[in-house]
Amino acid sequence: MDDFRDHINNLREDFTKGTLNEDGVNKDPALQFELWLQQAVESKINEVQAVHLSSVSLDGKPSSRIVYLREFQNNNYLFYTNYNSKKAQQLFKNPNAAFTFFWPDLERQVRMEGIVVKASAAQSDSYFNQRPYESKIGAWASEQSHLLASREELEKKVEELKKQYTPETIKRPECWGGLILKVNYYEFWQGRKSRLHDRICYELKAGSWKISRLAP
Ligand SMILES: Cc1cc2nc3c(=O)[nH]c(=O)nc-3n(C[C@H](O)[C@H](O)[C@H](O)COP(=O)(O)O)c2cc1C
């Protein structure tokens, strides 16, 4: 046990895979993100689309979890969830949110901040309709973030729903759909040697992006 704690205490990775500078980045942060995401995909990073989503309750309590990024365009980043979940309920009351991607094989982190809005019903329908039947049933079965008496309660519900809905008849539940993070702040982080990392941020000021460097 102590060995394990010592191991954690002494882990020190030096980052040497890349550099990042103000002149080398794309002037448009959405395009810079696309480039890094594409490189992460090409590097075959596991769960490349998994992103930490942080929300904050009205009384200022933060809460984080992973979601999957599903679509992105012009600083709008979309994920799907249950609108009655803890995250969605927080976001409807306080739309301020943040995303953090970490792609360890590239020694890169991307942070985004912005405001969350609901996707249109048509967009959510279109995505829901292309999901596998089992996932569709799951969306109906899970009252996400609510208490369950047991695993059996959930599995029983799944079986009942399968009798109720066939692959042909199942429609999107109204409480399930897309949320879009509209980003007004980005930070691109490239790990460097001896903790002297590169951090390039973009702030949206009067309609244009201001690029700056932050201390690591
Ligand atoms: C790799 C991974 C991907 C996930 N993707 C999603 C997702 O796209 N949407 C979602 O609602 N939950 C997703 N989850 C589950 C969430 O992390 C979380 O457990 C759930 O949404 C409930 O969060 P909440 O109670 O804070 O609302 C994912 C979890 C992991 C580990």
Image (cartoon, rainbow, N blue to C red):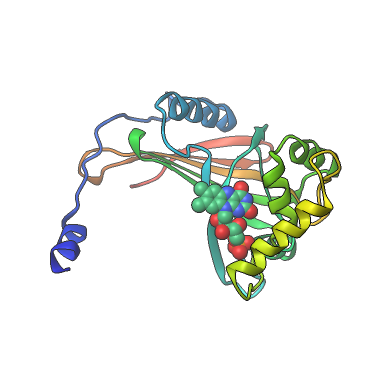
Q: Which residue is more in the foreground, 166 or 205?
A: 166
Name which residue lies at 63% across and 72% down: 148
Kindly indicate the quadrant of the structure image that contains residue 75: top right
Q: Which residue is more in the foreground, 70 or 137?
A: 137
Give the percent coordinates (x, y) of residue 58: 67, 71
Kindly indicate the quadrant of the structure image that contains residue 57: bottom right
Q: Quadrant of ligand 1?
A: bottom right
Q: Which residue is more in the foreground, 156 or 180?
A: 156
Q: Is residue 120 above or below residue 161?
A: above
Give the percent coordinates (x, y) of residue 197: 31, 41
Q: Is residue 38 above or below residue 177?
A: above
Name which residue lies at 57% across and 72% down: 61
Q: Is residue 123 above or below residue 3?
A: above
Please give left or right for residue 200 compared with residue 63 in the image.
left
Residue 98 visible at all:
no
Please give left or right for residue 136 compared with residue 211 in the image.
right
Give the percent coordinates (x, y) of residue 82: 71, 56
Q: Quadrant of the N terminus?
A: bottom left
Give the percent coordinates (x, y) of residue 36: 47, 29
Residue 118 visible at all:
yes
Please give left or right for residue 32 compared with residue 19 in the image.
right
Please give left or right for residue 185 compared with residue 215 in the image.
right
Name which residue lies at 48% across and 37% down: 48
Kindly indicate the quadrant of the structure image that contains residue 60: bottom right
Total numbered labels placed on residues in the image: 0
Name which residue lies at 19% across and 65% down: 5
